Every structure is written in structure tokens, then in C-alpha cells.
Amino acid sequence: MDQTTNIVKITGILVKTDLEVKNLGQPDESLGGHIVLRTADGSEHEVNYFANKYKKDAVDKKKFSNDLNGLHKGYETIVNEFKSLETNPDDADVVTIGSGEFGTQDYVDKKDTEKMIHYNDIKAKFANRVEVKDLETTPQVATFEVSGIVTKLTGEMKKGEATGNGEVHVDIIGYQANLVPVTLIVPATIVEGFSTAGFYETGLAKFSGTLINTKVTETVVEKQTFGADIVKELTLTVRRSEIAGGSPLGTIFDIKDGSEEAYEAAKSKRRLKLQEVKTKFMNKGQAATEQTGFTAPPAIQQTPPPANANPFGKNPFAK
């Protein structure tokens, strides 16, 4: 199958960098790590970079050639010349990333080894400083644009209660049919319009929106049987990919070379990867079982519902 859309764009003040050289002996030297960018809303986004110093051999991809990798040189510029808030708090650079996209990280929950934890990271190939003359006209924001197969539509729950927001799970089709599952949030203010736009589970869809990663303060009151209640101020991290708009695109068959068989093969590849993560964890001596806990995905729905049909029956996003 062809890849589906997976674009992340971020422009913000450079907070810090931790790119470092890993010298395993020539020609295996590499440079990798991440940078952190702060956007206008106060969100801080970590972006990952990695590049070998030398290009791979054109014939034998397991070997390195003598040709320098331009990305590696670019990352050296980040390390040596970019100014961050850590090193230049009064004169930090505003940086924009290039070729950014969502990735996925998976690991076993150490508190419950029957569970696996998944989260989306961000990786990019380029980072460029915004010139002073362009600062006023360059928004410092973090946005995304993705397309893929909708695997789940549900209401967002926090501490067992519905928030009123919607939750959309999407499988992005990545390089070599590697799936990148993402969870997107539909704000309560646009849930009604979303529910009647024609989205449905197993359908192909496209979404765009904003990345949020901020800290908020919440007041919690603990009622007491006698005397004064206990009032606590808690600092919480709000991290989500918030949908601003989107469109249904049809079915898996509308992807070039897309088919039910190809998608099933991609899901099998994903399940195998997760099993390998769990096996590696078990081999380190951690207590775990071979039960993966994954359930079979729903069958592909080849015929979409009417354009104005509510795919949920009653609105599942409502409180």
C-alpha cells in the first residue's frame, strides 16, 4: 500500500537540545537526540533526530560508504550554532522543523506486565532558524495533518467520567506498510458537526489540527467529615492532538494498492512487533506472560453509510 498522510509542523523558541555523538568506531559514528520547541501557547514539543555520519553503501546497505551524510552535518550546526533558552535565555533562536511526522513508541507496563503502553513521538529530518525579518509573520504553532484508517470512535473518558470530547483512533499507513496508530481528540464544541460528517470505523479519513502539550493548575477539594476541607493545587500535563477539521475519504480501497488483505498484513506486522517488544522485556527477567492481550480487529466495512448518517446511533461523545 501507498503511505497515507503523516505531517507534523512545529515552529517555536528553542528551549534546549541534547543531540550527542555516539562513536562506535568509524564509520559507525552517529549523531542523535532531540530538541525541544516552545510554541506561543506555552506548549513544549520534543522532536527527535538521528543521522549516521556516512551514507550507506549503494550496493550493500549493511555497510557504510565514504560519502558524508548531509543530515549529520546539519545536526552538527544545531549543536554548535543554535541558541537555546538554556544557553542564551535572552536571545534564543526561533526554529522550525522540516519533514516532521508522528512515530510510535511501545513498551510493557512495569506495574502490569499484561498491558502495553503506547505513545506518539515526533521525529524530523531538518531544523532551520527563522530569520529575524520573518519572526513577526511566522506563527509559532504546532500542527498536524494525517490520514488513515479509522479504527475506533468513542467518547473521551477521564477518571471514569465522560469529558464531552470525542476520541478518534487512526491507523496511519507508514513506510513499508508500518502502521502508526494515533489518538486524536475532537473538542466538545465541534462534536456535533463531527458526528454527522460521515466518519465511520474502518473508513478512510483525513484530519488536521493542533498539538497541545501544556501544564495546567487544577484545584481539588477533599471533603472532610469534620472541620475544614483540604484544598490542593495540582499541576497536570495536558498532552493531546486536537482535531480542528477533517473529511471522510472513502475506504481502504481508495489507497493506491490498498486492499483488505494488505491492511490485514500490516496489522499482523504491527502485532508481531508488539510481541517482539514483550518478548524482549520477558527475556530481561521481568515477570510477564506470553498472552498478548490483543483482540482481532473488526472486518473491513466496504460500503460506507449515507453521508449524513450518525455513525454512533446516539452521540457517544455526550456526557
Image: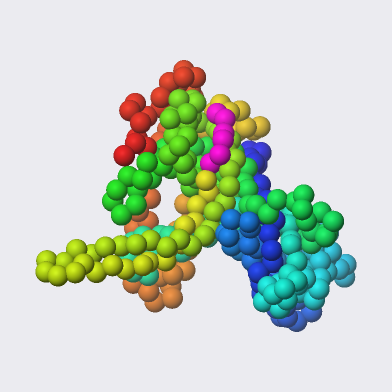
Part of the protein shown in magenta: 243-248
Residue 289 seen in render: no
Relative horizontal placement of residue 281, taking residue 1 as reference (left or right): left
Relative horizontal placement of residue 311, taking residue 42 as reference (left or right): left
Residue closest to the eye, 76 or 271 = 76
Give percent across and percent down for residue 97.
72, 57
Q: Residue at x 83, y 59 (%)?
A: 131
- Location of the C terminus by quadrant is top left
Relative horizontal placement of residue 88, taking residue 107 as reference (left or right): right
Give percent across and percent down for residue 145.
63, 42
Q: Residue at x 49, y 19 (%)?
A: 307
Q: Residue at x 43, y 21 (%)?
A: 309
- Location of the N terminus by quadrant is top right
Residue 81 seen in render: yes
Q: Residue at x 11, y 66 (%)?
A: 225
- Residue 246 position (above or below residue 211): above
